[in-house]
């Protein structure tokens, strides 16, 4: 409960939106333990060789834009390509395995040297199940990742096998499964660096703005925008604008930005995926209408606050964010 709007937002962010620090720290420890277990897979000539770099974090937990509940943690496990070659096709990427790569050859499509990403994930599944501490966990392949659900934690791990690749200009990126047996490009380093750079350039915590809008979009009052798309929609705004130091003002700005941009394409900033706005026309219209409705509510909430009516202002913010927003007392 709160006596003014400032304290209401402070409480809302701390108790409802941001991850609990203790759980976040525990998750990091558990994640490091999982990586250690993978690094200790037996060197039996069957499991693919691991790259010396071993792993790279990706996803919203890595970028510090995750909100409660902490439901998943993403890890890319880097495999050694052993001289394999990338073959770029129009709709997908193939990895042509070096005939000398003995641990990769059994994971190729039958009768070929083309590495099957589903078989690679399934090999991870086979070895994870043999780790005593994970033997009773739920382990399954989910499109491009191996999902490890430990009964002792509220989060699951998505393990994604990958390879380091490079282009003609020697810049490196990663190849991950595409969910169909082939591979696709990604580079979480670009997303993380971009998020950190834009956040550090503003007076407001852009991370908190992103978190607030992730909470907003998950409410049942509108279709949900995918996390990665929403992050980049907001980052695009702050890439060209200077923020205030008020979360309430920035909520107004981002609501207006969503209204004007949710119906438009949004290209992957890494240059790999093309348009990442996969919302349907109907979904875009509903989100646009909700952004307009909440923009006017937020404007009224700010006006009530400026006139000293904290109770009314907090009541309006509760209409926008729901019953988890602190009550006035």
Image (cartoon, rainbow, N blue to C red):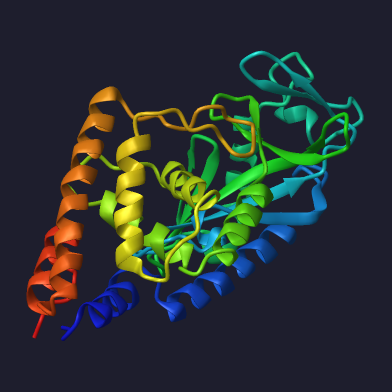
Vertical position of residue 119 compared to residue 96: above or below: below
> What is the x, y in percent for residue 15?
29, 77
The C terminus - image quarter: bottom left
Q: Image point 74% across, 60% down: which residue? A: 39
The quadrant of the image that shows the N terminus is: bottom left
Instruction: Find residue 110 and report its image quarter.
Output: top right
Residue occupying image coordinates x 54% and y 42%: 145
At which x and y percent is residue 230? Answer: 41, 45
Q: Position of residue 320 (x, y in %)?
A: 17, 58
**In-front residue for pair 110/294:** 294
Q: Position of residue 154 (x, y in %)?
A: 37, 65
Q: Is residue 248 above or below residue 291?
A: below
Please tell me which residue is depicted at 66% across the width and 43% down the height of the picture: 161
Task: Quadrant for residue 45, please give it.
Answer: top right
Left or right of 79? Residue 143 is: left
Q: Is residue 297 visible?
A: yes
Left or right of residue 317: residue 178:
right
Residue 71 appears in the rendering: no
Asked whether 16 or 31 is in front, the reply is 16
Q: Is residue 283 above or below residue 325?
A: above
- In this view of the protein, which residue sits in the foreground, 147 or 318? 318
Q: Would you place residue 319 above or below residue 278 in this image?
A: below
């Amino acid at each position: 409960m709160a006596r003014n709007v400032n304290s209401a937002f402070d409480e809302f962010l701390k108790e409802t939106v941001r991850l609990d620090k203790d759980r976040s720290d525990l998750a990091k420890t558990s994640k490091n333990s999982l990586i250690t277990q993978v690094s200790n897979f037996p060197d039996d000539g069957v499991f693919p060789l691991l790259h010396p770099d071993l792993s790279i974090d990706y996803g919203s937990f890595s970028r510090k834009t995750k909100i409660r509940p902490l439901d998943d943690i993403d890890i890319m496990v880097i495999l050694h390509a052993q001289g394999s070659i990338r073959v770029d096709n129009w709709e997908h990427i193939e990895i042509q395995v070096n005939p000398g790569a003995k641990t990769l050859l059994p994971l190729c499509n039958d009768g070929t040297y083309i590495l099957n990403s589903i078989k690679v994930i399934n090999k991870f599944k086979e070895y994870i199940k043999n780790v005593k501490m994970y033997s009773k966990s739920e382990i399954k392949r989910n499109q491009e990742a191996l999902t490890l659900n430990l009964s002792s934690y509220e989060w699951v791990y998505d393990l994604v096998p990958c390879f380091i690749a490079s282009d003609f200009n020697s810049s490196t990126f990663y190849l991950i499964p595409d969910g169909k047996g082939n591979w696709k490009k990604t580079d979480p380093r670009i997303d993380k660096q971009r998020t950190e750079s834009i956040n550090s350039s503003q007076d407001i915590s852009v991370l908190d703005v992103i978190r607030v809008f992730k909470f907003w979009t998950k409410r049942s009052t509108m279709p949900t925008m995918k996390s990665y798309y929403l992050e980049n929609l907001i980052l695009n705004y702050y890439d060209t604008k200077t923020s205030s130091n008020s979360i309430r003002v920035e909520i107004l700005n981002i609501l207006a930005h969503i209204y004007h941009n949710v119906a438009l394409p949004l290209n992957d900033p890494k240059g790999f995926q093309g348009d990442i706005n996969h919302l349907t026309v109907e979904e875009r219209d509903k989100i646009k209408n909700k952004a307009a409705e909440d923009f006017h509510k937020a404007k009224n909430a700010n006006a009530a606050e400026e006139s000293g009516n904290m109770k009314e202002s907090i009541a309006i913010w509760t209409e926008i964010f729901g019953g988890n927003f602190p009550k006035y007392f």
